[in-house]
Amino acid sequence: MIKNFRVYFSSFAKNQFRFTRRQLSSQKGVALLLAIFTVVIITYLVVEITYDTNVEYIVNANAVNRIKAYYAARSGLELSLVRIKLYKKVQQQLGKQMGSQAKLLDLIWSFPFVWPLVVPDGTNEVDRGMIKDTLKESKMDSSYSTRIEDEGSKIDVNDLASDSKVIRELTHKQILNIFESKMKDEKFARQNRDVRFEEIVNNIQDWVDADTQSLNRGAESELYSQVNTATMQMPPNRPFRTVEEIRLVAGMTEEIFNLLKDRVTVYGMKAINPNHVGKDVLISLDPSMTDEIVSAIIKRRDNDTEGGPFKEGQDHCKSDFWGFTESKGARVPNETKDNTPLNCSQVANFHIHSVGEFAGVTREIDAVVYDLSIGANSVATQLKKENPPPTDPRAPTQPGTPAATATNPTGPSNQALPKGPPRIVYYNEH
């Protein structure tokens, strides 16, 4: 019996050992799977955290770059305001004394400026060293470039609703002349032979005038029936706030808008400055102003040997400008010469374009500086001319003193400049 027990126990032990061995082998497989799964999870988490960290770093770095680029553009804007202020101050103090050389003062605002400074070719070693030392001392690690343009010499579309009938009619004529001059281009004429530009100009005027009757007959709102709702009515019968709004005028196409956008403004001087106005605006004054005549005007005003800038003063400006154009073959009607407001004095309204750049990121700022007093004086002068106040013939006048003195469209030369930076009436950053 004892022998049988030993045999049984030995057989049981062997079977138990085999079971335990199989169980341990099975647990090793599960542990290996758990280890592999754990490594995969950890690897995934590490990759995700690394990716998110890199994305967040790039986003924050770009945000910092945009801020630096913005303040670089803002630095260019502030410097441009200083240049405009300096120009006005120097012009007021030295403009008359310099005579025909006063046009050199325009370099104060018209010359483009970039930072870091570019050392021009031919600069001597002393100046080159001073420029390099200045750049090293500067803490600005970004760059910017600025450009200042004459904004007031463009055609002001809001003058289509001016209180002055002469200014209204002149503006209407100028805009229409832009299209008529462009029709000399065969490609443009072929693509727009069915376009009635007179109606488009009327639609622009309907946008800004106070009445609701279209110059093309009918109600103005009929042209905008598809967009008019209870909360929005077009045209708004108010001045344009930006040039971009002209896109919304009935009949306006992208091609026609692109033709107008660089020639018109909403911040005009209410007068034409032949010493600064562009070629397109000069052509728009009258159909007899050919390319050859306009080129001669630009050549004369930019060259002292040809005569230099046209004379200042309302009467001198008109006689000098129209006399020169007629000497070159222009046949301008007397009505146009008498009713076209001219201003040969200093530039008053400016468009500033500043671009800042850092680490490949750019920010741009556009601003318009507007001198309200000059535009107001110009309109007042024209209104006084159209509607002269009644005079009493019995009123005594002193010898050598005119009964009435026309308002100076540029303001008194000895008038103190306003304190602070020039007035910004338009600001846009992008």
Image (tube, rainbow, N blue to C red):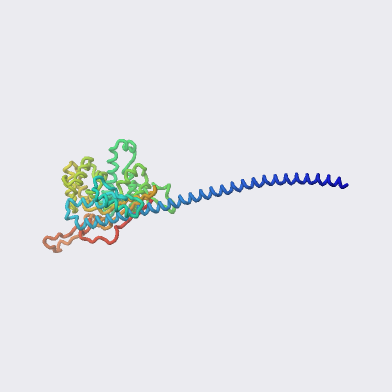
Residue occupying the point 18% across, 49% down: 310
Residue occupying the point 42% across, 48% down: 227
Q: How many marks?
A: 0
Whether residue 384 appears in this view of the structure is no
Left/right of residue 59 with respect to residue 202 in the rendered view? right
| Residue 2 x/y as whole percent | 87, 47
Outermost residue, right side: 1
| Residue 57 x/y as whole percent | 46, 51
- Comparing 315 with 20, the one in front is 20
Left/right of residue 55 with respect to residue 150 in the rendered view? right
To which quarter of the image does residue 140 belong? bottom left
- Comparing 262 with 194, the one in front is 262
| Residue 248 x/y as whole percent | 38, 47
Left/right of residue 52 with respect to residue 302 in the rendered view? right
Residue occupying the point 73% across, 45% down: 21
| Residue 233 x/y as whole percent | 40, 52
Whether residue 298 appears in this view of the structure is yes
- Comparing 101 with 307, the one in front is 101
To which quarter of the image does residue 22 belong? top right
Outermost residue, front side: 3
